[in-house]
Image (tube, rainbow, N blue to C red):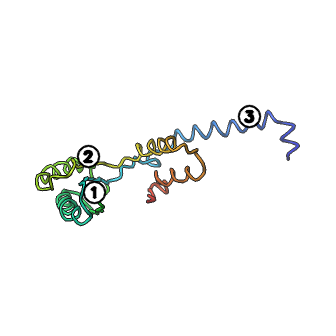
Amino acid sequence: MTLLALRNSIAILMASLAVVVLGFVALGRLPVDLFPKINLPIINVGTVYTDAGVVDVEKTVTYPTEKAVSAISDVRFVESKSRQWLSTVRVWMNWGADVNDGQTEVIQRIQQILNTLPRGIKQPFIVRYDLSMGLIGVFWALFLTDTTLSTTSFMGIIMMVGIVVSNGVLLVE
């Protein structure tokens, strides 16, 4: 078999190129539902409260923020973490909910309770997850840390983006 391949190297090259070209043609004809646009319905609210301990942050910042954002429509659940100087509230919305509307509602709720929060806090920041921008962030992180694209980092990228399986998406956290 090897001898046949060596004698007909042009034929083997043409067959390999045909497989590559047919692969690209088939990729272009794949239905759209095999590559779904994934918008994770997650909105983060972060608040910095300098010179405050964990208990103070939890009682005066995290709990009121959690209570305010849990009342918006299409919220599946709310989780929070309080650390020294930092409150993080994550709002998980129902799949299929309009995350842009949810983000607008979160901003409105935060603006409503802003006067009741302690005076030493910084302006809360509201971040929505976007996987397409996450991929760009991964490559920036690889560049900034001077890390090469190895098998390990490539596996991390695949896990971050998610794996498309039978028109569904398996998300790895």
- In x, y percent, where is residue 76? 27, 62
Q: Between label 1 and label 2, give the one nearer the viewer.
A: 1
Q: Amino acid at mark 3?
A: Met
Rate crowding at label 2 as few (under 14), some (14 to 19) or many (20 or more) other CA atoms within 10 Å: few
Q: Between label 1 and label 3, give the one nearer the viewer.
A: 1
| Above or below, comparing residue 142 to residue 42 in the picture | above
Task: Please name the residue that numbered disc 3 is placed on.
Answer: 14
Q: Amino acid at mark 1?
A: Trp
Task: Please name the residue that numbered disc 1 is placed on.
Answer: 85
Q: Is residue 5 left or right of residue 34?
A: right
Could you tell me if the residues under marks 1 and 3 are in contact, i.e. CB atoms within 8 Å?
A: no
User: Residue at 63% of width from left, 36% of height from top?
Assistant: 21
Q: CA distance from mark 1 to mark 3?
A: 63 Å
Split into 4 quadrants, where in the image is the C terminus?
bottom left
Task: Please name the residue that numbered disc 2 is placed on.
Answer: 100
Q: Which mark is residue 112?
A: none
Tell me which numbered mark, 2 or 3, is placed earlier along the sequence. 3
Tell me which numbered mark, 1 or 2, is placed earlier along the sequence. 1
Residue 93 appears in the figure: no
Residue 137 appears in the figure: yes
Rate crowding at label 3 as few (under 14), some (14 to 19) or many (20 or more) other CA atoms within 10 Å: few
User: Residue at 32% of width from left, 53% of height from top?
Assistant: 41
Compare residues 66 and 93 and report the one nearer the observer: 66
Q: Is residue 16 left or right of residue 44?
A: right
Tell me which numbered mark, 1 or 3, is placed earlier along the sequence. 3
**Local SS, label 2:** helix
Rate crowding at label 1 as few (under 14), some (14 to 19) or many (20 or more) other CA atoms within 10 Å: some
The furthest residue to the front: 51
